[in-house]
């Protein structure tokens, strides 16, 4: 599963992609990450990527030419790539969607993720998008954090990335609504706070019942 992130700020995403589960996924050959600097596709000697909006208004918009060129380049690098455009106006990202994408990725789909910045994208860029994704009803400075949320939430669902194969199946939202039960580790008592007796009982039936109730 190849993830290509197109961004003006590669330094924001590189460290996350080489840490923890993302690092593990890439070490095991289960996912591959590439970061493309949008500036490399910019126009003219100054590698221009943005311009002022027609009709006036504050801020700068990412221009069509560099983004179209970057997406065409990325598509040539990995076949069957779907383009994900990060935008607060997109469909709200949910665990169930991450699970769907993880499955489609295992069937050969790859992903190109577009990070907006400044005021966002020239509207014509939306024609490139197979999916428009929002990570919540708030506005961030750029699409880098949303891109990482998208990638992380998918990659950890690829079988073999998390430690136990059941880890992802019993997590919060794995069925779309239920939250995970409370968990404890040693010591059995800390500052007067005790681990529930049932978890120390060794009775797996009772433990499963308690977990379901919680
Ligand atoms: N002017 C845009 C609007 O009002 O909808 C917001 C642009 S925002 C400052 C810059 C970029 O950050 C967006 O183009 C998008 O890529 C990203 N972004 C910001 N908030 C986001 C969110 N909640 N979900 C996904 N992407 C977001």
Image (tube, rainbow, N blue to C red):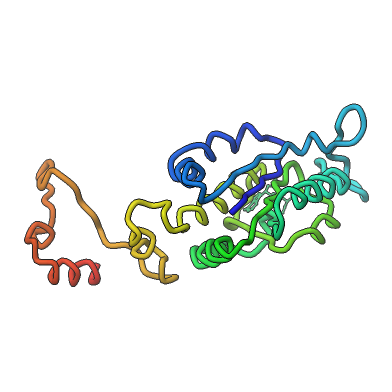
Asked if residue 139 is positioned above or below residue 201 in the image, the reply reads: above
Instruction: Say which quadrant the N terminus sits in.
Output: bottom right
Instruction: Say which quadrant the C terminus sits in.
Output: bottom left
Q: Image point 83% across, 38% down: which residue? A: 41
Residue 80 lies in quadrant? bottom right
Q: Image point 12% across, 43% down: which residue? A: 187
Q: x%, y% of residue 126?
A: 79, 59
Q: x%, y% of residue 32?
A: 58, 46
Q: x%, y% of residue 199?
A: 13, 59
Asked if residue 56 is positioned above or below residue 209 in the image, the reply reads: above
Number of numbered tags placed on the structure image:
0
| Of 72 and 47, the residue lying toward us | 72
List the single residue furthest toward the top.
Answer: 45
Asked if residue 116 is positioned above or below residue 124 in the image, the reply reads: above
Residue 7 shown left or right of residue 179 in the figure: right
Q: Image point 67% across, 51% down: which residue? A: 113
| Of 183 and 159, the residue lying toward us | 159
Residue 43 lies in quadrant? top right
Q: Image point 47% across, 46% down: which residue? A: 28
List the single residue furthest toward the front.
Answer: 29
Residue 6 shown left or right of residue 197 in the figure: right
Q: x%, y% of residue 86?
A: 67, 53
């Amino acid at each position: 599963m190849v993830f290509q992130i197109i961004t003006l700020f590669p330094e924001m995403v590189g460290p996350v992609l080489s840490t923890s589960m993302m690092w593990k996924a890439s070490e095991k050959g289960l996912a591959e990450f590439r970061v493309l600097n949008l500036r490399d596709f910019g126009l003219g000697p100054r590698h221009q990527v943005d311009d002022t909006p027609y009709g006036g208004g504050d801020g700068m918009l990412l221009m069509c030419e560099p983004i179209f060129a970057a997406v065409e380049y990325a598509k040539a690098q990995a076949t069957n790539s779907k383009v994900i455009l990060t935008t607060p106006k997109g469909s709200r990202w949910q665990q169930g969607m991450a699970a769907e994408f993880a499955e489609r990725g295992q069937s050969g789909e790859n992903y190109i993720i577009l990070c907006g910045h400044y005021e966002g994208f020239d509207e014509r860029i939306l024609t490139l998008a197979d999916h428009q994704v929002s990570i919540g009803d708030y506005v961030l400075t750029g699409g880098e954090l949303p891109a990482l949320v998208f990638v992380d939430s998918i990659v950890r669902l690829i079988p073999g990335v998390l430690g136990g194969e059941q880890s992802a199946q019993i997590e919060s939202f794995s069925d779309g609504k239920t939250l995970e039960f409370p968990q404890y580790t040693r010591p059995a008592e800390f500052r007067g706070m005790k681990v529930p007796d049932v978890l120390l009982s060794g009775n797996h039936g009772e433990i499963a019942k308690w977990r379901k109730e919680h």
